Image (cartoon, helix red, strand yellow):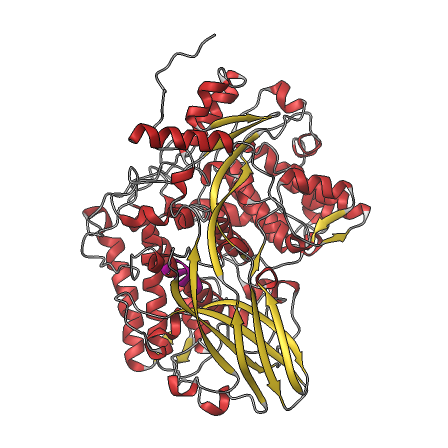
């Protein structure tokens, strides 16, 4: 019987080998010739990132560029001098692994970013980047360069390649990469008929590798059921984008971005991220996110099948003892950090870092979020920073289970050491659910919104109709060519992008939400749509008082309401908090040749992939509830920078679920709860229609 199933899987693979290219639905904007020229220069530095092309323009510029001789071309000479000081001592060597979570590597990366950021003009910026591309560590360069392109004014609107095309090794398991390496070394597939047994197919001039997600070989627990989410390339890129837009070491006082709401953004991001993960646990029957203690073994292990240049990723067995000799001091710090916050909660205020914070003030969330992130805005500039130690970073090192670093530049990586891979580790969600829980405890100092604050006089939602919600798995692929090393000849001849990794990914059918609103007035309104659980882990109805922090925001938009009946139809493709997957690098270049760029990649704040809007449903439908809320539009109280454009009003993020709720006040006419079910069609587990875990005829000798 097993043989029949395996053969059926292989036949399905052969039949599916010709997969229709993914269709992208997006608007473009026209750009001028100067923009195109500069955009292409920026993109050129992402090509073949682990090697240097001595014939390319950037090499000829960067090889002999003298930073010190051009110091007058930077707006902050002190920052340039700090970079040069570190450069003379010795930066991270090439081909070493880079992580922002190690102090020396972080100091070097920040200094390099400053070199890029303070360049007076684009030409100086490009020359500085070319210099770093030639002379410095690849990962460190890419980290600082990615953030600099996002943050510089003269590169605002530039499009960046997806992280999984830049760092393929961080987004796919090693077994798939080994197949790619072997194909490259053999200069092709030796036997096409044999290769199909291993999930390798040649389609025209490109090689396609069918990749499974991690399974029970890597997880000795039920977490493997969620790998289609935790290992999704769009999901992990979303986290990388978040960090790139607002790095924890970034001082918003210095750069002027969202200082008044930074801690709130931190809380909202992780609260929403852990809620989205929690929904996936619910539909898979796994229940709430587990808790852990620093002084007891953590039950959830993780065995990543990933590797860096020199070292495999560290593994954490089930029931791993956190409180071991190597972690005594770190856990003492973590414990004191948590207890300090709890003691402040008991007092209702926080006094430290030159600040006095009253927890009864709703704006205290900015400080509380900054406290847990331990970011650059937590401290006043004039305060001596003799002892700044990050709770997040220390916790990642303890949970990652890697040995201590060998020296200032050498460490064995864990999945928690990189923003591109952290979401793969179940411990990540347990850690940040813990942090969100502490911040929620502070939120209990905020009184629930009273009826008069939530009521929208003269506006009533009569009905909400939600089309059937259906999830499914479908194939999607990405370019992994950047993972291979090329010969000198291949680099010179622009080696084609012909190594594609194809995986089944979670998706959903488009749906619409129709909102019938009756109004006595003409007004501008904000409409929000949330998704929330209907029942708790044990199947019992859950109250709003228990559940206020488990609503996931789907959409947020403004609408002009007119007197009388208003029929508002919102399609899921329009939901403002989601976007399409990034356009492939090769398609970006084709668009640039036409003088265009994708609007959603150029101007949109980075959002969750639209595919992942809904948790995977069940065959009979998993119960959730939609919450639709209409309230008066009040614009933000200050002028917005381009980065802040996603802040459309003056309400807290997550409003009205930004604080504990009184269910009796959530029965206003401008609110509507709608029971829904999320269904799933097709295979429930992606590996069932992808490459089987066991292969048929792998020992057969192919005929010549």
Q: Is 632 situated above or below 606?
A: below
Q: For residue 367, what is the image quadrant?
A: bottom left
Residue at 34% over, 29% down:
4
Q: For residue 68, what is the image quadrant?
A: top right
Q: Is 228 situated above or below 566?
A: above
Considering the image in quadrants, where does the N terminus appear?
A: top left
Residue at 71% over, 53% down:
154
Count of marks, rendered view:
0
> Can see residue 112?
no
Q: Which residues are magenta?
A: 272-278
Q: Is 555 situated above or below 359?
A: above
| Residue 30 screen position, x and y as percent | 78, 52
| Residue 523 screen position, x and y as percent | 66, 85
Pick the residue in front: 343 or 199: 199
Left or right of 441, for residue 91: right
Q: Is 182 situated above or below 410?
A: above
> Can see residue 103?
yes
Report the predominant secondary structure element of the magenta stretch: helix
Left or right of 225, for residue 119: right
Residue at 50% over, 21% down:
183
Pick the residue in front: 513 or 333: 513
38 in magenta = no
277 in magenta = yes
| Residue 440 screen position, x and y as percent | 36, 73
Pick the residue in front: 5 or 663: 5
| Residue 552 screen position, x and y as percent | 45, 67
């Amino acid at each position: 019987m097993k043989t029949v199933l395996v053969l059926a899987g292989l036949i399905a693979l052969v039949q599916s080998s010709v997969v229709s290219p993914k269709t992208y639905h997006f608007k473009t904007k026209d750009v001028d010739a100067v923009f195109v020229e500069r955009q292409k220069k920026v993109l050129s530095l992402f090509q073949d990132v682990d090697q240097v092309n001595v014939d390319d323009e950037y090499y000829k510029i960067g090889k002999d560029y003298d930073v010190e001789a051009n110091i007058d071309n930077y707006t902050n000479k002190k920052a340039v001098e700090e970079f040069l000081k570190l450069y003379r001592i010795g930066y991270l060597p090439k081909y070493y692994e880079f992580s922002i979570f190690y102090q020396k590597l972080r100091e070097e990366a920040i200094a390099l970013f400053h070199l890029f950021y303070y360049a007076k003009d684009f030409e100086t910026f490009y020359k500085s980047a070319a210099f770093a591309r030639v002379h410095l560590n690849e990962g460190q360069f890419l980290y600082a360069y990615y953030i600099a392109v996002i943050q510089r004014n003269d590169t605002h609107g530039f499009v960046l390649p997806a992280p999984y095309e830049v760092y393929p090794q961080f987004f796919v398991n090693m077994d798939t990469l080994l197949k790619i390496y072997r194909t490259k070394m053999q200069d092709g597939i030796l036997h096409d008929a044999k290769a199909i047994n291993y999930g390798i197919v040649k389609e025209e001039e490109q090689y396609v590798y069918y990749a499974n997600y991690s399974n029970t070989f890597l997880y000795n627990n039920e977490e493997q059921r969620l790998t289609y989410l935790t290992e999704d390339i769009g999901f992990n890129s979303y986290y990388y984008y978040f960090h790139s837009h607002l790095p924890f070491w970034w001082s918003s006082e210095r750069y002027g971005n969202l200082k008044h709401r930074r801690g709130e953004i931190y809380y909202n991001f992780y609260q929403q991220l852990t809620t989205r993960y929690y929904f996936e646990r619910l539909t898979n029957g796994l229940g709430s996110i587990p808790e852990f203690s620093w002084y007891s073994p953590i039950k959830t292990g993780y065995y990543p099948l990933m590797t860096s240049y020199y070292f495999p990723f560290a593994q954490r067995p089930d029931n791993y003892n956190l409180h071991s000799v190597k972690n005594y001091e770190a856990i003492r710090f973590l414990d004191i950090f948590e207890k300090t916050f709890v003691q402040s909660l008991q007092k209702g205020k926080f006094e430290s870092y030159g600040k006095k914070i009253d927890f009864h003030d709703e704006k205290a969330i900015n400080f509380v979020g900054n406290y847990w992130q331990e970011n650059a805005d937590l401290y006043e500039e004039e305060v001596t920073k003799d002892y700044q130690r990050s709770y997040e970073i220390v916790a990642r090192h303890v949970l990652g289970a890697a040995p201590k670093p060998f020296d200032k530049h050498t460490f064995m990586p864990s999945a928690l050491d990189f923003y591109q891979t952290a979401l793969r580790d179940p411990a990540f969600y347990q850690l940040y659910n813990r942090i969100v829980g502490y911040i929620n405890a502070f939120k209990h100092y905020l009184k629930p919104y009273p009826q008069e604050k939530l009521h929208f006089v003269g506006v009533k939602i009569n009905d909400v109709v939600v089309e059937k919600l259906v999830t499914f798995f479908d194939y999607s692929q990405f370019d992994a060519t950047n993972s291979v090393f090329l010969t000198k000849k291949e680099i010179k001849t622009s080696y084609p992008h012909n190594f594609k990794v194809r995986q089944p990914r979670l998706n959903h059918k488009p749906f619409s939400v129709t909102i019938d609103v009756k109004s006595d007035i003409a007004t501008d309104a904000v409409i929000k749509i949330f998704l929330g659980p209907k029942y708790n882990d044990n199947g019992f109805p859950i109250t709003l008082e228990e559940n206020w922090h488990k609503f996931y925001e789907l959409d947020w938009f403004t609408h002009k309401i007119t007197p009388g009946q208003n029929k508002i139809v919102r399609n899921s493709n329009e939901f403002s908090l989601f976007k399409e997957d990034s356009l492939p690098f090769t398609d970006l270049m084709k668009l640039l040749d036409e003088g265009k760029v994708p609007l959603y990649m150029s101007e949109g704040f980075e959002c969750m992939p639209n595919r992942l809007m809904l948790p995977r449903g069940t065959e009979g439908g998993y119960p959730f509830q939609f919450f639709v809320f209409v309230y008066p539009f009040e614009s933000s109280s200050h002028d917005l920078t381009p980065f802040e454009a996603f802040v459309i009003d003056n309400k807290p993020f997550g409003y009205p679920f930004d604080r504990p709720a009184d269910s009796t006040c959530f029965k206003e006419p401008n609110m509507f709860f709608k029971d829904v079910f999320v269904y799933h069609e097709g295979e429930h587990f992606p590996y069932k229609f992808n490459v089987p875990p066991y292969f048929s005829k792998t020992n057969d000798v192919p005929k010549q």
